[in-house]
């Protein structure tokens, strides 16, 4: 966690042209993932862009410390840590965090594909509504398709804790979804 | 295998995190345990629902912003990225323009977010290899293309005679509403014109703003809000607006 928390220039080095070049090849291809993760963390498209941009810049500054591990979890970990720092600022600058937390349905808009059904909307709203700790582990596992080991790296947790968190998160999301669907049948009777 | 063990393995099984041996053991246990089968079904259903959510790729505007940052840090642009970086610079200038309220005239009065979408739209036109969805200089091809795609009939006029050949049209989404974008060419430059029905009455004359060599023009004519963006000289932008207004008025 401490590795990439706050200090802007860990060793005073500014990345040179060749570092930027390597960064483009190794890290930049994961921008979609970084943005997608940021979208679910922030639940706001504008804040997600700010977060993704800030994270990429931070990643570049720490890139000299990148030792050829997997780039995607490495970048997502930076996104998450950057958000931890940024959300305080966001809370102070605009609305109170509580309002953000309660603005339930603002995940990525599944209606963008016009034919997307009721079901997707409910799932997106439920995922946006559950607590951040529940949401992040589900997004990493199911949407970003990370393994337990990779999730452990992003969240800086032991694998055992990832497993128990994931199990709890699935239960929570199922409960949230059931609450939203009420008794209507959306083919989710198994939940 | 007793049931608590079996139950604890459901998630790892769904997530493909069990060894081959453990998986086989789990499947055997599953056959005699209805409770765990139900749990497995629920976990699978949940997993599929989440995976079914549409992915939202990083917006063009974000890419442009990051390009600009990388370029600033690297000190000098790479040769093959030069063209892209030029547009990144344009993105930067547009952000400034929006900060100054250039885009005004919101569709729904919501502000910020919509402006971002519109800039991203300009960038798509500017950066894309194929900037249009329907490529034609024939207004009788382009205009019908918009039918059923946007909920209004945008004015479509080829201005080749005035030095602005029509390249075609495309759609963009601003504030959740589909809008028509017409793409014109002036020598080697592209010009993107976004058009939507005005809510305010009366025509306004073209207002050209220049930021870093980039011309932004806004005006209202014949019941339409017009927003044009290009890297043309201001005088040329003005003559484009004048030519378009005349074409609309004379129906040519």
Image (cartoon, coloured by chain):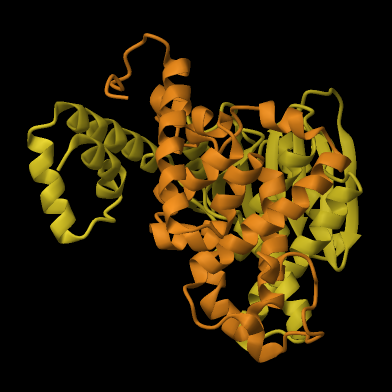
* Percent position of residue B242, x then y: 82, 47
**Residue A136 position (above or below residue A188):** below
Q: Which chain is yellow?
A: B
Residue B166 can be seen in this image = yes
Name the residue nearer the viewer: A85 or B10: B10
As drawn, is B188 to the left or to the right of A185? right
Residue B131 found in image quarter: bottom right
Residue drawn at point x = 69 percent, y = 89 percent = A17
Q: Which chain is orange?
A: A
Residue B245 in the image, given as x and y percentages of width and height = 77, 41
Task: Pick the residue in front: B62 or B31.
Answer: B31
Counting labels gives: 0
Taking the image as drawn, is residue B158 in sight?
A: no
Q: In the drawing, does residue A16 fall left or right of residue A174? A: right
Query: Which residue corresponds to the image point at 65% horizontal and 76% vertical from the top-left?
Result: B83
In the image as oriented, which residue stretches furthest toward the top? A183
Q: Position of residue B205 (x, y in %)?
A: 90, 40
Q: Residue at x 67, y 40 (%)?
A: A44
At 36% from the left and 10% from the top, the residue drawn is A184
Q: Position of residue B201 (x, y in %)?
A: 84, 22
Left or right: B112 in relation to B189: right
Place residue A40 in its image quadrant.
top right
Which of the 4 image quarters holds residue A191?
A: top left
Image quadrant where one finds the N terminus of chain A: bottom right
- Compared with residue A82, is residue A45 higher up or lower down, i.e. above or below? above
- Decide which of A108, A89 is in the foreground and name it: A89
Q: Is A62 placed above or below B147 here?
A: below
* Left or right for A100, reference B153: right
């Amino acid at each position: 966690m401490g590795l990439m928390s706050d200090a802007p220039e860990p060793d005073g080095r500014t990345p040179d042209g060749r570092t930027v070049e390597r960064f483009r090849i190794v890290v930049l291809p994961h921008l979609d993932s970084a943005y997608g993760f940021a979208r679910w963390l922030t639940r706001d498209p504008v804040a997600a862009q700010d977060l993704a941009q800030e994270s990429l810049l931070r990643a570049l500054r720490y890139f000299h410390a990148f030792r050829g591990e997997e780039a995607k979890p490495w970048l997502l970990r930076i996104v998450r840590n950057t958000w931890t720092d940024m959300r305080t600022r966001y809370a102070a600058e605009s609305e109170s965090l509580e309002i953000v937390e309660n603005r339930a349905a603002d995940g990525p808009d599944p209606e963008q594909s016009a034919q997307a059904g009721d079901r997707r909307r409910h799932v997106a709203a439920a995922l946006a509504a559950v607590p951040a700790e529940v949401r992040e582990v589900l997004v990493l596992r199911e949407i970003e398709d990370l393994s337990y080991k990779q999730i452990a790296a992003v969240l800086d947790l032991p694998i055992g804790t990832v497993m128990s968190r994931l199990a709890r998160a699935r239960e929570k999301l199922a409960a949230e979804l059931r609450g939203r669907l009420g008794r209507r049948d959306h083919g989710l009777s198994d939940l | 295998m007793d049931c608590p063990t079996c139950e604890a393995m459901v998630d790892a099984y769904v997530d493909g995190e069990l060894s081959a041996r453990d998986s086989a053991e789990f499947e055997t246990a599953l056959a005699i345990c209805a409770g765990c089968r139900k749990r497995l079904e629920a976990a699978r259903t949940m997993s599929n629902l989440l995976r079914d959510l549409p992915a939202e790729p990083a917006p063009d505007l974000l890419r442009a912003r990051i390009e600009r940052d990388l370029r600033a840090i690297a000190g000098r642009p790479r040769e093959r990225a030069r063209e892209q970086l030029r547009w990144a610079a344009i993105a930067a200038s547009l952000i400034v323009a929006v900060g100054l309220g250039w885009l005004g005239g919101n569709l729904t009065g919501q502000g910020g977010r919509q402006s971002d979408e519109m800039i991203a739209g300009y960038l798509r036109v500017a950066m894309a290899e194929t900037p249009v969805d329907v490529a034609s200089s024939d207004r009788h091809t382009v205009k019908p293309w918009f039918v059923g795609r946007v909920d209004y009939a945008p004015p479509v006029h080829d201005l080749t005679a005035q030095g602005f050949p029509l390249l075609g049209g495309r759609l963009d989404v601003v504030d959740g509403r589909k809008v028509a974008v017409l793409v014109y060419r002036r020598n080697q430059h592209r010009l993107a014109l976004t058009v939507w029905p005005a809510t305010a009455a009366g025509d306004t004359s073209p207002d050209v703003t220049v930021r870093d060599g980039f011309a932004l023009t806004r005006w209202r004519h014949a019941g339409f809000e017009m927003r044009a963006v290009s890297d043309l000289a201001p005088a040329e932008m003005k003559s484009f607006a004048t030519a378009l207004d005349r074409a609309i008025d004379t129906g040519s």
